[in-house]
Image: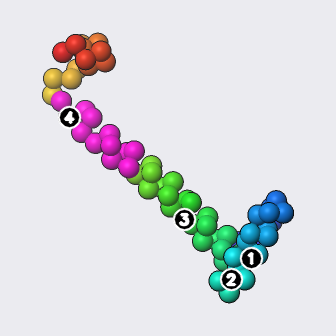
Amino acid sequence: MHKTHVVLEDWQYEALRTLAAQEHRSISDLVREMLTRHLAGNREMARQRLAAMEGMGADAHATGQDHDAFLYNTR
């Protein structure tokens, strides 16, 4: 683990402090969990975007010679 210093708005600190007290957890623990969720969400979104491109070049007829037909759907 690494230590870091984060500057929060007053309302952010109060919200974290209240939530930490309600859940009997530390603010650090809550921040780590929130970051993990956020970063994992970004990773999943990137994976989905990559998966959406699957098969993009699978058409044997798609060559550079007729690229306009593919770009402008005139094929």
Q: Nearer the viewer, mark 4 or mark 3?
A: 3
- Measured in 3D between alpha carbons, the distance from the residue under mark 4 to the one under mark 1, in whole angstroms, is 54 Å
Tag 1: amino acid? Thr
- Of labels 4 and 2, earlier in sequence is 2
Is residue 46 among what the camera can see?
yes
Residue 16 to residue 45: above or below:
below
Mark 3, other Cα within 10 Å: few <14 / some 14–19 / many ≥20: few
Locate residue 53 relative to residue 28 in the image: left or right.
Answer: left
Query: Residue 60: which quarter of the image?
Result: top left
Nearest to viewer (mark 4 / mark 1):
1
| Residue neighbourhood size for the residue with mark 2, other residues' Cα within 10 Å, grouped as few (<14), some (14–19), many (≥20) | few
Label 3 secondary element: helix
Q: Position of residue 68 (x, y in %)?
A: 29, 12
The residue carrying mark 1 is 18
Q: Quadrant of residue 49?
A: top left
Q: Is residue 37 left or right of residue 7?
A: left
- Figure check: 41 above or below 27: above
Residue topped by disc 3: 37
* Mark 4 residue type: Ala
Look at the image and give the residue range highlighted in magenta.
48-59
